[in-house]
Image (spheres, rainbow, N blue to C red):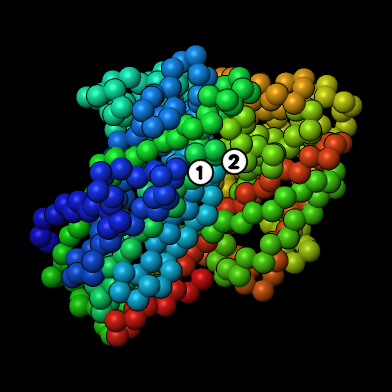
Amino acid sequence: MSSNQHLEIVPSNITSNGKLSYKNGQPTIQLLIGAQERMIVPGSIRLVGNFTVMKNETVIPLESDKIRMNERLGVYSIIDTLSIFSQTSGQTIETINHHNRMMSSYLSVTQSQQDFACHAYEQALRFPNYKAQQLGVITNTQGASASGGTSPNSFCIPLVCGLFMGQEPIPLSGQTGVGGLQVEIQLSPDQNVLFSGDNSPDALADAYYELSNVRLICEVQRPDPSLPTPGPVNTFTYNSISSYYNTINSANAVLNFNLGLKSVLSAFMNVVPASHINNFARDGLATLEFTNKDGSKAQIEQLVFTRAGQREPLEYNIDTLQKKSTGRDNETADAQVVRNYMNAVMSFAKINRTSVQPSVYRNIDYSTDNTFSGAKIVPDGGVAWGVGVAYDSISDQGLDFSQSPFGVQLQLRLTTDNPNSIYLFVHSRQTVVSQGGSIQVLK
């Protein structure tokens, strides 16, 4: 086999000054990898660039401005939607909406606090301490272009999705592969990336983030000539992440989603009050527990997963530790809920490191009023709460939801009028069929 070659791709919609930002009308990054008789080495794709936060067009934030961003996500907070298309046919191969919220669950479950505090900062500007992340990234005078900084906040992050994180090389051939790739990144609004650390968002009225020197890098290789030549019909199987959104505002909540997927491996979700989204006064990317309007937690008393109305894969209700307690006298996280959630993000037996622990997955008091101040200063990078369930972690064949709706039933202590947003992410297997220069995606 020939040696690997490195590709470095500049966005096709780059501006004259080389900068991209949501505020200045460039909310999309488009990257094209042309059709060729080579394959992308799995796991090699990286988004590279520089990241700067500005208080306005000419001034960088000061520490006294209390401008912050989600320290658990870092640069990942800017990716709202990640879409991958065939470059030749335009066929959608994978789209993950709310990618930043999916990453909050993924990073929490699969990376340890040691990862979080070391290479994650160099790679993605993430840090488990909110003040360190604020001083090192947001108020970094050396990195600000407006002040002539010479050491900008650089990042180099894997683009996490089922297609790019698989084990098989991705064929780029126009005849027997995906026909090249078009990668599109929709940037998240400034109001959902930046927020005030003291609930006084006046300093953020003109604040925004911007990217510069953005490019995509990856490794490619030619097919091994010793292997059989692909026939006229070629298939390529990969895992995929699909996303769904809904809100609940009831103590007895029932969620139903028509997934339309045949091989569902797992499903997990995270939550934030709907009023926090796109709000400079709140962290819209926090993965909080269900919350009442006054900031008190709305604990789960019972959790049921269903398929077409029947309990599946768990043939019983999960009655949490809080069900028989009164008020908020039991602050312990339910071990069965935590374990199922982690198992949905990654097979529990394969998790070698994680940062999900009692200090971040528990019924934390956010505050005693509606400032939610407690949610902004919790230790170890903030709350890493979520629920989920795995359907198949052994055979990787999954469960058929093409005709059967996925359901979740929740009994909560939601006592006030406070809609909570639920972001559901479903892990499934999909197949690309290539024939005569066209492709078809079988979900």
For label 2, the SS is loop
Which residue position holds label 2?
Answer: 278
Residue at the left extreme? 2
**What residue is at 63 percent from the left and 23 percent from the top?**
199
**What residue is at 44 percent from the left and 27 percent from the top?**
55
Residue at the top extreme? 64
| Type of the residue with mark 1 | Pro
Q: CA distance from mark 1 to mark 2?
A: 7 Å
Residue 289 vs residue 429, the one in the foreground: 289
Tell me: 418 left or right of 274. Answer: right
Is residue 338 visible in this depiction of the protein? no
Which is nearer the N-term, disc 1 or disc 2?
Answer: 1
**What residue is at 44 percent from the left and 45 percent from the top?**
22
Which residue position holds label 1?
Answer: 189
Name the disc covering residue 222, or none. none
Residue 222 vs residue 181, the one in the foreground: 181
